Amino acid sequence: MPSNKSKSEKNDAEKQSLRDPYDVLGVSRNSTDQEIKSAYRKLALKYHPDKNANDPKATDMFNEITFSYNILSDPINGINMTLLVLRSNYEINQNFYFCAWPFFTSGAVGNDGQDLELDLSSLGAMNTMFAAIFSKLGVPIKTTVSATVLEEALNGTVTINPIALGQPVVKKVEKQCAHFYSVTITEKEAQAGLVCRVQSSDKSKFKLLYFDHDENGGLNLALQEDSAKSGKVTSAGMYFLGFPVYRLDRSSNSMASAKDPDTAFFKKLDGFQPCEINEIKAGMHVFAVYGDNFFKSVSYTIEVICTASFAEEKESLRSVEAQILSKRLELSKFESEYKQVLAQFTEMTSRYAQEMQAIDELLKERNEIHASYTTTSPTTKRSSSSSSSSSSRKSKNRKESKEDGNQKASSNSRDHRTKKKKWFNIHVKVDKRKPC
């Protein structure tokens, strides 16, 4: 009986782990990406391990929620490539591999292979160090906003500082902490469009956040933009211009570029996707800057502007993004043509090497046939050649011995002359004009 019970419990656990991700998140199959993301964040806050330290069921539920969200948000690339990179480089440093293994088995990365977003505030110092090292090595480490920050925003206990339009603010935020800003706009300014940009001159990592007002008076995270390197700074921006504006997710292309440069080129624009929110209404809007560095604080400059005087820039942005979309379609067609030509080129180079080898072998065989036209036998030719070579060596040795003898004689004569000129190495000069 106990064994049957354990098997049934195991089957129940397997069924639980294979639940429909829509049912896990409590959303319908026709839900938008924004609705799925909102449902995930609310459930993740509820079952986060930091809030339920002594409840293993809550931890399992949190892992299942995160796994389901990653399937629905990115069904193609929802596989953790970090372990694949480590395993492919296993021979590089086995000790480092085994030291880093706890980072992947402690809940920082999903045990089932799903690509999770790490909450750095909940990691220990050792896991944070390994995450920083892997990030430097080029392994894509996705991070998420601290659950503590999101919970405080949802409860309405964060401090919000007002910011004026067109007035940049320079501040420094600590790692895994956030600074909240509010801006109030009129109906006319909302129709003209709004842009919020943040940049860091020391190339720090940060997140730009936009919050919706919750029914209970709190703030619910609606948009998130990760910083990206742009010249000598890192920057992030949100554009509410009244028409579809696109964002480029570079994380989906980072692993492809490491494995195959050609694939990375053709997949470069796959992360070019429209933003969830394109326009905002009049009233108060809340932004936040979240420090996403592993160990140090983030120095940043935030600026919110009305785009009423940027009509030309708005049209240029719309035109450029339309061209990028057309280029994305052209790339998909060009990829098939490129692969065909590349296959033909590979075949031609292989044939070139084979033909070159065949020609060299034929010419060599032709030379051997030419050399066979002689009346002397091969052994006679070898003996004659050996005798001629030995005689040449003997004559050469005789010449060398004669030259050595001549050189010795000349050296002896030179030594004798020098001895005559000197008497005990003292020069004696006699003046013949004066008698002794």
Image (tube, rainbow, N blue to C red):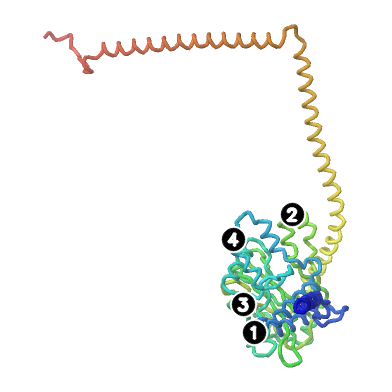
Q: SS class of the residue under badge 4? A: helix
Question: Which quadrant of the figure has residue 334?
Answer: bottom right
Looking at the image, tell me whether mark 3 or mark 4 is earlier in sequence order. Answer: 4
Numbered label attached to residue 261: 2
- Tell me: residue 283, above or below residue 20: below
SS at mark 3? helix
Q: Relative to the observer, which residue lies in front, 44 or 231?
A: 44
What secondary structure is marked by label 1? loop
Q: Earlier in the sequence, mark 3 or mark 1?
A: 1
The foreground one among 361 and 274 is 361
Query: On the rendered image, what quadrant is the N terminus found in?
Result: bottom right
Query: Given the image, on which type of amino acid does mark 1 rest?
Result: Asn
Residue 54 is tagged as 1
Mark in front: 2 vs 3? 3
Residue 96 marker? 4
Count residues near mark 2 (Cα–Cα under 10 Å), then give few for <14, some for 14-19, many for 20+: few
Where residue 119 sits: x, y (%)? 65, 76
Lower sequence index among marks 2 and 3? 3
